[in-house]
Amino acid sequence: MKKNTKKNVVKPDERRIAALVKELLSELGEDPEREGLVKTPARVAKSLVYLTRGYRQDIKAVVNNAKFESGTNHMVILKGIELYSMCEHHMLPFYGQCSIGYISQGKVLGVSKLARIVDMFARRLQIQERMTEEIANAVMEETGAEGVGVIIKAKHLCMMMRGVEKQNSEMTTSAVLGTFRTDEKVRQEFLSLI
């Protein structure tokens, strides 16, 4: 890995990753030199760097000062945010949707920034439970909200295509902070709106 001096963030070495993938293909009994696999190591390396780009992102850069005066303190909700991540246990994908709600205290985030925050945490090796909490904490910190609620519903390929092989299982996780945790009415309003 090479240090990216611009952001002081580790930048993966795609050539090294490709060499490791080539070795893995051999270990699995494949011929990495056959026509269909010759370019696979480089493709996998490029894909993995992209799929884990969240490690090299910073919340301040993601939000990019897109905080706006609203003069209100009503609930703001964005639901149906698609997410794609990889489980840290098997490096297999999980995918689903995230809903975020927060009660602003005079400032709101640009709506696209909520989706970008989700992507930043999803594009890492993850477990859904931790990712839900990370998103909630980031939204709370960046908005200075009275409260935040995050719900993620996702399907995990590690459960669907290996192990217990349960095709229709869906995991739901939630994280509630501030008034979403302490005020039952606020929590119920959020749940009814999503």
Image (cartoon, rainbow, N blue to C red):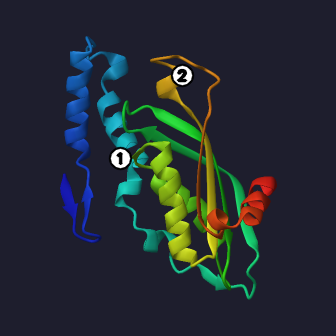
**Residue in front for this viewpoint, 29 or 34:** 29
Q: Quadrant of residue 38?
A: top left
**182 w.r.t. 160: above or below:** below
Marks counted in the figure total 2
Identity, as a three-letter code, of the amino acid under mark 2 = Met
Task: Point out residue 114 in the picture as x, y percentages from the top left corner.
Answer: 60, 64
Left or right of 141 on screen, residue 27: left
Residue drawn at the location 36% of the way across and 41% of the way down? 48
Residue drawn at the location 36% of the way across and 33% of the way down? 89
Residue drawn at the location 49% of the way across and 46% of the way down? 129
Task: Point out residue 32 in the picture as x, y percentages from the top left corner.
Answer: 26, 20
Mark 1 vs 2, N-terminal side: 1
Q: Tell me the element at label 2.
A: helix
Q: Tell me the element at label 1.
A: helix
Left or right of 6 on screen, residue 172: right
Which numbered dot is residue 49? 1
**40 w.r.t. 35: above or below:** below
Residue drawn at the location 24% of the way across and 58% of the way down? 10
Identity, as a three-letter code, of the amino acid under mark 1 = Val
Q: Mark 2 Cα within 10 Å, few/some/many (few <14, many 20+)?
A: some
Q: Which residue is mark 2?
A: 160
**Residue in front for this viewpoint, 188 or 152:** 188
